[in-house]
Image (cartoon, rainbow, N blue to C red):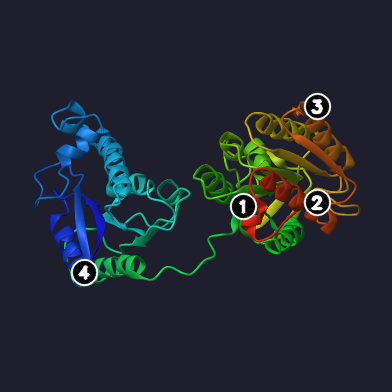
Amino acid sequence: MATVLVLGTLDTKGPEYEFLCDRLRSDGLTPLVVDVGVLGEPAFSADVAREEVARAAGEGLQADVLRGDRGGAVSAMARGAEVIVRTLLEEGAISGAIALGGTGGTAIASRAFRVLPVGMPKVIVSTAASGNTQMYVGESDLVLMPSVTDIAGINRLSARIIANGAAALAGMVVSKPPNVDASKRVVGASMFGVTTPCVTAARAWLEERSYEVLVFHMTGTGGRTLEALASQGWLSGVLDVTTTELADELVGGVFSAGPGRMVAARAVGLPQVVSVGALDMVNFGPPDTVPEKFKGRLFYEHNPSVTLMRTTPEESAELGRRLAMRLSAGRGRCAVFLPLRGVSALSVTGGPFESRAADEALFGAIREYLDREQVDLVECDTDINDPVFATAMAGELDRYICDESDCLTMGRTE
């Protein structure tokens, strides 16, 4: 039987975890229990005791943080649990993970479970599984299952929900993995609605040449996920067509990916081809959610839930500087492609966001700040969604990847 990690506070939720373990066994799994409780004595013995988790965090259970400071205790046990889970993963001891919790238990488990690679089943039955769950899920494939009631006793409702969580994990663990062609090289691509034709054409070109293309929607989470997969070794290269999240980071839009955007590929030396897709816009929610300070700016209603605001020449210049500086630091083959006739479907000639002044400010800053010894610069007299531009970007990435490997292994030659 496959072994799965069961991580939880056995002092406050002992009966619930005993029920969960029984359900896992009945579903054909062997639970390996890690206790992260700090308030009282555990209801039953764990395979990894809380003292061992605390030591892994660099804290003893008699330390002040575990005697009276619950917040400090939770943080300490989260650090320790992360170390324990990483060790179990490296030993090949587990095939999945599950936890039950309120906000504290979910915080501990989610930090520990993010150590597990994408694709390894991970489930938390949680009272916090609604609203903004970014702090728990991050860039992982963690499944948060609403507990409906608090994790406080086994009753006709909680029993069914916890049993469903166990069954969900069991189904993922024992299910036969899908057949995939592992010989294909994997490329990550960034897309937005206003750059979809470009990415679609580039993806088709690459797929014809035996690449597998993972497309990410640049909504903040998409950019962070692309960066995470690049740093974790999932990708052979990055086709970063759409860098719009930089605009939200700078101006204060809702789709910022934070300062780590456009960093990972250069840090690990992945081949990367980048453009300035949708840097003509900042993203907000419905019109009535746009901050008052932007009154009088140029807006476009993309759909009822998304309002776009045109970036100014001043903002565009700073965006160009940031893009150039981030790409100039690092290693690996890299190129920036500039579409001189429009950086999105909205800023082409006659489009609602057409602004040669803003575009030239963007391009000019990139020309000024880009380290041309580290990064190639290609300027194209097309808009970003022209198929010629798309295939040029794809072809450059293909060339970079092939320069670093034997293209015969991809079933083709140059």
Q: Residues within 10 Å of mark 4 (few under 14, many from 20)?
A: some
The secondary structure type at the circle numbered 4 is helix
Image marks 2 and 1: residues in contact by CB distance under 8 Å: no
- Which comes before the other along the chain, label 2 or label 1? 1
Q: Residues within 10 Å of mark 1 (few under 14, many from 20)?
A: many
- Which comes before the other along the chain, label 4 or label 2? 4
Identify residue for label 2: 392
For the C terminus, the quadrant is bottom right
Question: Between marks 3 and 2, how big is the CA–CA gap?
Answer: 23 Å
Q: Residues within 10 Å of mark 3 (few under 14, many from 20)?
A: few
Image marks 4 and 2: residues in contact by CB distance under 8 Å: no
Give residue 356's quadrant in the image: top right
Q: Nearer the viewer, residue 156 or 178?
A: 178
Foreground disc of the pair 3, 2 = 2
Q: Amino acid at mark 2?
A: Ala
- Which comes before the other along the chain, label 3 or label 4? 4
Q: Locate residue 310 relative to residue 192 in the image: left or right.
A: right
Q: Nearer the viewer, residue 403 or 304?
A: 403
The secondary structure type at the circle numbered 3 is helix
- Which comes before the other along the chain, label 3 or label 2? 3
**Residue 359: percent from left, percent from top:** 84, 40
The secondary structure type at the circle numbered 2 is helix
Q: Is residue 17 visible?
A: yes
Q: Is residue 301 visible?
A: no
Residue drawn at 30 percent across, 37 percent down: 79
Residue drawn at 16 percent across, 66 percent down: 22
Q: Residues within 10 Å of mark 2 (few under 14, many from 20)?
A: some
| Count of residue discs | 4
Identify residue for label 4: 159
**Residue 368, numbered label:** 3
Identify residue for label 1: 188
**Residue 311: percent from left, percent from top:** 76, 41
